[in-house]
Image (cartoon, rainbow, N blue to C red):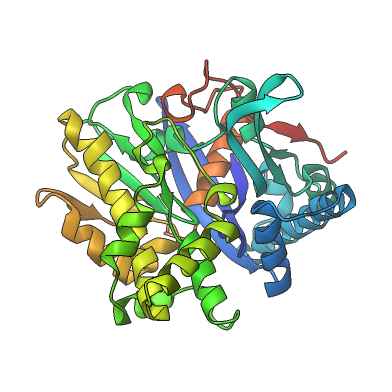
Amino acid sequence: MIGIGLSSGTSADGIDAVIVDIIEQNDTIFIKLLGFQKINYSRELSSRIKDLASGSLTTTSEIVRMNYLLGDLFAEAALKVIEQSRINAENIDFIASHGQTICHIPEADLFYGKQIKGTMQIGEPAVIAKRTGITTIADFRADDVAAGGEGAPLLPYVDYLLFSSKDKSRLIQNIGGIANLAFIPKNCDPEEMIAFDSGPGNMVIDHVCSILTNNRINFDKDGMLASEGKYSEELLNLLLKDKYFQKKPPKSCGRLKFGKKYCLDVIDKGKELFLMDNDIITSVSMLTVETIARAYNDFILSKGNVIDEIIFTGGGALNRFIIDKLKEKLPRSTNINEIEDFGMTIESREAISFAVIGYLTLKSLKSNLKIATGARKRVILGKISKPE
């Protein structure tokens, strides 16, 4: 099948769109990337999405309009990647859209007499299907939550299909807005994997940069600002006391946990310690590094596992400060492998993964993992919107 994958992560900077050929042979899935486009949100829209995802006050009418606006923008992204790849739209079998997360509540709390948790991704799939004329699968996380899971991380089974090896234990480290990992022991079954959100990836760094520069700089390109500062051990140790980092998997998080309020508190703590702006940026960059490294030690290496290879992906994989510091903390025996060796790029991996989930959904195959999300059972993910 030829499918389109659409994804916008917790960084909320825009939409990644891919066209991918998915080939299944002898229960093994292979992918061939046929096209990639990045469609950036306007600065104003990106800022508002981040505010909504951080729990900002809103109205039902704004959420409804945002759902349909993003549906239109996701459809536009699909049409642009079709045009760029010069593939006839009639040859596209489906679109798989992750949508844009605006709320993620992974832990149940008492709500009108019942313990309720949930997650919400918007970007109306009916709009995508009708505007493109292509069957669209979306809202993947809801089925996992309905089965008792957290709805995240949702890509580990795809990681198993695309990266597992009979003779090498691999770790896929995504550093998006949130950092999450998928450890695939050699010659394992999917439910023997270890996969969870370790904590903030770029999210806190980006927001701190934005606040400290009055929106002049929205992210630390190549980690240059972090490399110019000096991190505060006192501030870092204070941040590492957060209970989330000690919590055992399965676990997931988002902007409600590490969003605007969290970043403002971090900056206030930094100012109380008389830190320069660059030193605060360096300190939150080290928070990403340290929480990822501790996740390896606490939940993988301490169990006697060996990480033969690590593959970095997500926007944070382009942050040289984070990657260089992480490499210093890896076991010497761990090799760094490039994601390009597997037919994809750092930027396209997530959209490709959702295209694969869409493919599995159309084949009536289950694609969540209990070990990753805490669901009671494996389920088929997503809702299907037809173009007719």
Image location (x, y in percent) of residue 88: 70, 55
Q: Is residue 213 above or below residue 59?
A: below
Instruction: Name the image quarter holding residue 52.
Output: bottom right
Answer left or right for 140 relative to 127: left
Residue 130 visible in the picture: yes
Q: Nearer the viewer, residue 350 or 173?
A: 173
Answer left or right for 115 relative to 266: right
Image location (x, y in percent) of residue 76: 75, 61
Q: Is residue 147 above or below residue 322?
A: above
Kindly identify the residue that appears in the image at 59 percent across and 64 percent down: 37
Kindly identify the residue that appears in the image at 58 percent across and 83 percent down: 216
Q: Is residue 45 above or below residue 192?
A: below
Answer left or right for 356 relative to 110: left
Kindly identify the residue that appears in the image at 51 percent across and 27 percent down: 368
Image location (x, y in percent) of residue 208: 50, 70
Q: Nearer the viewer, residue 18 or 190?
A: 190
